[in-house]
Each structure stands twice: as structure tokens, then as C-alpha cells.
Image (tube, rainbow, N blue to C red):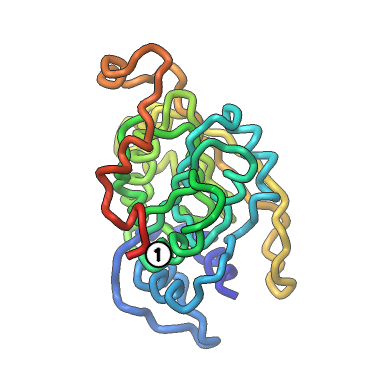
Amino acid sequence: DQKAHVKSAVSQPAMAHTVTTVGSEQPTQDGEPPPSAFGTTRYWDERYMRDKEPFDWYARYDALEGLIEAQAAGKDVEVLHLGCGTSRLGEALCGAGYKYVMNIDISRACVIAQLERYASGPHRNNKFMHGNACALEFPDESFDLVIAKATLDVIRCGKGAEGNVHAVCREVSRVLRPGGRFLVVSHADDWEEVLEAVSERDAGDARRAFGWTLERAKVPKPQTDPRHPDGAVLHVYIATRDPEDERPSLAALKGVGQKVSSLAALGALRPLANAPA
């Protein structure tokens, strides 16, 4: 079970590094890829070229609905979904009335599959683009809510994860609006310690380094495979950006109470953001 490999990798205390495009790695004895393969772009491109069917890692929207609703500031919000894969989360969020969802993934094959799937769908506010969570192509303070479901666990499967986890956190902090929230859905029970560790290179704690405070919640984990009873809960880490921490440069550009919309950035993005290649 590939999900079991992801859990196995993130359960290890040592951190690895992410989205590097490297050659295929040797499979395990049962023919499954090793945990480190999940941290490569090539693995995900090959996977999504073989299998374009919708799939939600860890949990579907219905299992997370209450948590997301509790953390979002209403539904008139703009959501960034990091590492979307072929998930239906964006569709479900838009269907539930959320204003706008931008789904990004490091795999071009995945994004093309999603663009094709939703080309004629009813939710025109469910957007997709090829992108790297370590270097987001959006203006500062563009989103009210950022969701990473399994994405940071995948990042820990590759090489040099500490640097990439740090980069993701810095980018998410940058694109979150004051008071915005970053939801990390994970199998691992140690992300608080990991986030504190990667923040040491800056100011020594997550609040000073990334401008947010951390809390933790749990949600029941859907049992998908009885052969791998890997726990009854998913861990959700909630990082809330300081509501008073508005960047002075943006305050000077914006009128009182106005938002800099991530939609304004779409015109400058690559063609892949708007139509299948």
C-alpha cells in the first residue's frame, strides 16, 4: 500500500528533502517504491501519467469539513491548496460555497490531468497551476487559508527536507493574510517539533520566524486498508498568522480593509495555469 510507505517514511525521526527531480529509485521487495521515491517529482509525474483518476490522500473533504469550517473566516475566503494531486478537495470547497481555490502541484502531469477534468465543470473558481510550494508565484498576503494535506509528509520523504520545509513555511507565511491560517494534515505526530526546529535558523521559534502561532487538533482517520491499521486519527497542525502583522509595504499599497487578490497574479502566470498544454 503506497499510503503505508508514506506513513512509514514520516514516522522516522530523521528528516529528508523534497521535490528534487531525480532518477527512479530501486523498488522494495514487494515491488512498491521506497519511501524516498515519494520525495521526487519524477515519481509523481510517472504516477499521474499512469493513473489520472481522482484520489484523495489521507481523507476526503467530508472528513475535514468541520475542521476547515472552524478555521476559515467564513466562506468569502481565498484558499491555496498545496500539493493538490488529483484530489477533489478544491471541487468540494467550491461546492460548499468557498469563494476561490487555487490548487498547485509540482507534477505537470497531475496539473494537466486536473485542468482537463475540470475544463467544463461548474466551478470556475476552482483553479489549477503548476507550481512549487517552496517558491510560490503569488503576491504577499494573497490567501486567507492554506491547506497542505499529506504534502509536508511527502516533503519529508526526499533528500534535504529541512531546507524545503523551511522554504514552504516561509512562503506560506508570506502569502497568508494577517489572521490567515495554514492547515497541515499529517500522519506524523511531531510536526510541532519539526516546525520549531526549522525556525531556529531564523529567530529561534515559529512565532518570530514565520509570524504565526501553532496549535494542534486531531480528526478521525478513515480506515482505507485493514491490512495497515496505522492509527485512528490524523494530526492537524494549525498555524495562525498574527492578525496585527501586516507588512508595511502592503499597507501603503492597499486601501483600508482591501485585499490584494491572488487572482490579480493569474495573468502573469504561465499558459499552463489557464489551459491544458
Comparing 263 with 156, the one in front is 263
Residue 7 image-quadrant placement = bottom right
Label 1 sits on a secondary structure element that is: helix
Residue lying at 74% horizontally and 72% vertically, measured from the top left: 226
State the image coordinates of residue 219 (x, y, percent, origin top left). 69, 47
Quarter the N terminus occupies: bottom right
Residue that appears at 27% across and 18% down: 253
Where's residue 60, x and y in %? 64, 55
The C terminus - image quarter = bottom left
Q: Is residue 258 shown above or below 21?
A: above
The one nearer the camera, 39 or 96, is 96
Judge the density around disc 1: few (<14), some (14-19), many (≥20) Cα neighbours within 10 Å.
many
Residue found farthest to the top: 256
Residue visible at 43% across and 24% down?
Answer: 178
Image coordinates for residue 48, horizontal then vertical, percent: 45, 72
* Image coords of residue 148 (percent x, y): 49, 48
Q: Is residue 149 left or right of residue 172?
A: right
Count of numbered circles in the view: 1
Q: As rendered, which of 27 and 51 lies closer to the eye?
A: 51
Residue visible at 53% across and 41% down?
A: 183
Residue beneath label 1, please?
112
Depth check: give the residue in front, 246 or 200. 246
Q: Is residue 74 above or below residue 113?
A: above
- Does the rendering let one see residue 36? no
Image height check: is 39 above or below 73?
below
Whether residue 184 sits left or right of residue 171 in the image: it is right
Q: Amino acid at mark 1?
A: Ile
- Specify whether residue 96 is in view: yes
